[in-house]
Each structure stands twice: as C-alpha cells, then as structure tokens.
Image (cartoon, rainbow, N blue to C red):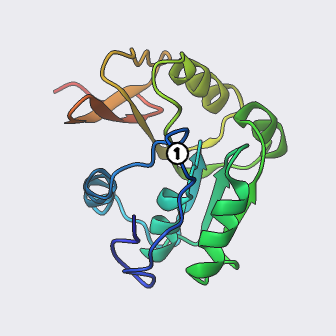
Amino acid sequence: MRIIAGRAKGHTLKAPKGMSTRPTQDRVRESIFNVLSNYGLIETTVLDLFSGTGAFGLEAVSRGASLAVCVDKRTARIIKANTEHCHMEDAVEVIPTSIETAAKQLAGRQFDYIFADPPYEVDLVAATMTVVVNQQLLKENGMLIVEHHENEPLVLPDGWSLVREQRFGYTKVSYCVPYELERS
C-alpha cells in the first residue's frame, strides 16, 4: 500500500498485521480520487472515518487538502507512524476513538469530504450515516464517500442524493451529497 499521487507519491504505508483491518485497495482509492479531482481537493478539509492505515486522509493531503482528520479506535499508532513517514504532521490530526465519541469531539466542525469505510457486514453503514447527519459534519456542498459491501444497503436521509456509485468486486463506493439533485 502506498500514496498514489501528490507530494508524498510513492511513500509506502504500514498496515496492521492480520486481517482485522481491510485496507482500501490502491486501485479503489485511485478511482475515488479520480472522481474527487472533478470536484477539487486543493485547500479542502477531509474526515476519514474507520481510517485504518490513514491512507485516504494521507492521500487527500498529498493531493492538496489542507487538513485530514483520521478517526480509528484500534490503529491510531499506525496512522501516526504513517503520517510521520509522509511528513504530514502539520496537516493530519489523529483521533484514537470510536466514531460516536469522535463525533462529540468534532462538534461544530464541518468537512468538505468525509470518507467512511466501516467494517463490512456489521451494520455500521447506517450508524455512520446517522453520526454524519446528526452531528452535521459535512459542509453544505460537501460529499460523503462510503465504501461498503455490495449486500449492505445504503439508505440516504431525506434530502440527500446519490451522485455516483462504483463497484469493485463485492465492494461498492457510494458518493452522497446532502441536497436533492435537480431533476431535468
């Protein structure tokens, strides 16, 4: 696993040993960032929930985001080590707790992009959506990107729209925005 583009391109990232963490594959992350490049990353703020290695947040900063907040209860030390390895300590904040606790710590803050990659098939997709919506963590024109198993339903709150969806084997990546898309 490595940083794909930007100022830290090529830096390898440490991952936890074993299969308790399922890092997003480089090709999936690259595809996500290709989509996001159409919306702009320069000087944006990013929240990376269930951050694992911190790859999404680090990739965003490498490509021009001004801040990434990485939340993961189990892998905070690995995220911090990867942040130091990529020389991004000034732009990456690590919160070593659950997303429910982190949401309280993040009260009043909003982000341009929120990436959520909860463990598959344990009913965390809906819980994640609830935290993002109830805590108003996403900016008005922001985007929530959820990586989830194809069998997990993604139920959008009232007023939200699905902008795009991608499939990678059994993995789905859903791009959601907090406003209704105009119908033509």
Please state if 76 lies on the left or on the right of 86 as rendered: right
Displayed quadrant of residue 168? top left
- Determine the residue positioned at 66% across, 28% down: 131
Foreground pick, 100 / 168: 168
The residue lying toward the viewer, choosing from 165 and 97, is 97
All told, the count of numbered labels is 1
Foreground of the two, 164 or 183? 164
Q: In this view of the protein, can residue 180 be seen by the observer?
A: no
Q: Quadrant of the C terminus?
A: top left
Residue farthest to the front? 18
Q: Taking 23 as reference, is 66 above or below it? A: below
- Label 1 crowd (10 A; few <14 / some 14-19 / many >=20): few
SS for callout 1: loop
Check the image and report above or below for 20 versus 85: above
In the image, taking residue 155 as reference, residue 15 lies left or right, namely right
Based on the displayed image, in which of its 4 quarters is residue 153 positioned? top left
At which x and y percent is residue 19?
A: 49, 40
Q: Name the residue that disc number 1 marks.
A: 18
Left or right: residue 49 versus residue 96 is left
Residue under the image location 25 percent in, 56 percent down = 27
Is the N terminus in the top left, top right, bottom left or bottom right quadrant? bottom left
Q: Residue at x 30, y 63 (%)?
A: 37
On screen, residue 130 above or below 48: above
Percent of width and height locating residue 34: 25, 60
**Can residue 55 be seen from the camera position used here?**
yes
Q: Is residue 9 above or below residue 110?
A: below
* In this rendering, position of residue 13 left or right of residue 148: right
Q: Nearer the viewer, residue 65 or 168?
A: 168
**Farthest left residue in view:** 184
> What x and y, as percent, mark residue 61?
51, 71
Q: Amino acid at mark 1?
A: Gly
Q: Residue at x 56, y 22 (%)?
A: 124
